[in-house]
Every structure is written in structure tokens, then in C-alpha cells.
Amino acid sequence: MKEDFKIRRFHKDDAAAVSKLSAAIPELNPWPLSVYECVQEAGFEGWIADCNGTIAGFVLTRCVSDEMEILKLGTAQDFRRRGVAAALLTAAFLGAVSGGARRAFLEVRASNAPAISLYQTAGFRPTGRRRNYYTAPVEDALLMTCDLERKTQFPLGG
Ligand SMILES: CC(C)(COP(=O)(O)OP(=O)(O)OC[C@H]1O[C@@H](n2cnc3c(N)ncnc32)[C@H](O)[C@@H]1OP(=O)(O)O)[C@@H](O)C(=O)NCCC(=O)NCCS
């Protein structure tokens, strides 16, 4: 079943659960709990995929001028390949576009094939490479960008 979760805004009350989920996802460099507790104060936007009170996934973004950056995106292991990340990106895109964003960008580990596949499906294209950007292990980052003005469907196609 694909639609057994709801997308809603991140609330401060979600901080502990999101921090715990982040810590359980090895591909993410988790932030300290205090950062998740200050998401709104820091000017970030966040969305949660909520499955009957369980956090199935989350995305945190930052909009500056006409650009949106994807800061963190993760889906809990048990909820993968059910459209959670696609739905979260949809919410993030629509929120950013309604706020005036025209471009989205992110960095991703060059070896993170599932995430790169997701982002390409969502309309992102590789536009640069940052050498040795990540540590533990040291690895390049791919810089990917998405022209939000040219998208006609969210997040797939367009
Ligand atoms: C990458 C990640 C967020 C995808 O989450 P998800 O909820 O499973 O993704 P979705 O179900 O919405 O997938 C949408 C599409 O993305 C692509 N995709 C997602 N996971 C994929 C995988 N493991 N391999 C290949 N393509 C994948 C597919 O095109 C998929 O559509 P399909 O299932 O109809 O084929 C998840 O694997 C994850 O949390 N990974 C660890 C954290 C991470 O790497 N975050 C990004 C850091 S920049």
C-alpha cells in the first residue's frame, strides 16, 4: 500500500523522534537534538510523513532568496519504496515555490545510489562535484540542482 501515511508540517514536538530516526539512518550525518529543537527558530522548513503517529520519514529544507536547499531527507527502513520521500519532496517543492523559490539544490554522497536515483526521478540533475566534501569516510559530494520553474508535476516528471 502506498498511501498509508500523511504529510504534515514538522513541529517542535517532533524533534526527539526525528533526531532518533536520523541517528538510525547511517547515510545521514545527524545533528544534535538541540538543532532539531530549533528548526523553526533557525528559519528551516520541515515536513513529516506520519503513519498513525509513527514518523515514517522527514525532510528539512532552508529557503534563501529564490533558492531552496534540501538539508536532510530520510525514510525509516520499514517504510522505504512506498513513496514517502517522493511525497515529502512534493510538500517541500510546493512550499518553496509558494514562497518564491525558483531553484532547489542539495549535496549527496557520490556513492549514495538510492538517493541519487530518487533525486533524478524528482527532477534534480548533477551540476557539480565537491572533492572530499564528506568525512568518515572521505568522499566527494555531488551537487544536484532542480529548476522549479520548469516543473509541471511534483515531484516526478515535469
Ligand atoms: C533515499 C531515500 C530517502 C528514499 O526514500 P523512499 O521513501 O524509500 O523513496 P520513495 O519510495 O519515495 O522512492 C521514490 C523513487 O525514488 C527512487 N528510489 C528510491 N529508493 C531507491 C533505491 N533504493 N534504488 C533505486 N531507486 C530508488 C525510485 O525511482 C522510486 O520510485 P519507485 O519506488 O516507484 O521505483 C531512502 O532510501 C533513505 O532514507 N536513505 C537514507 C538517507 C539518505 O540517503 N538521504 C539522502 C541524503 S542526501
Image (spheres, rainbow, N blue to C red):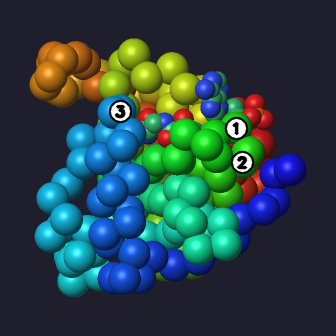
Residue at x 33%, y 82% (from the top left corner): 12
Q: Which residue is mark 1?
A: 81
Percent x, y of residue 135: 13, 25
Asked if 82 appears above or below 89 in the picture, the reply is: above
Element class at badge 3 = loop
Q: Earlier in the sequence, mark 2 or mark 3?
A: 3
Q: Amino acid at mark 2?
A: Gly
Q: Which residue is mark 3?
A: 27
Q: Which residue is mark 2?
A: 83
The span from disc 1 to disc 2 (Cα, nearest Å) is 6 Å
Q: Amino acid at mark 1?
A: Arg
Residue at x 77%, y 55% (from the top left corner): 153
The span from disc 1 to disc 3 (Cα, nearest Å) is 16 Å
**Residue 92, can we see it?**
no
- Disc 1 within 8 angstroms of ligand 1 (CB): yes
User: For residue 29, which quarter of the picture?
Assistant: top left
- Disc 3 within 8 angstroms of ligand 1 (CB): yes
Percent x, y of residue 86: 66, 50
Give yes or no for contact between labels 1 and 2 (Cβ–Cβ under 8 Å): yes
Residue at x 43%, y 23% (from the top left corner): 112
Left or right: where 127 falls relative to 50: left
Along the line of sight, the residue nearer the viewer: 26 or 109: 26
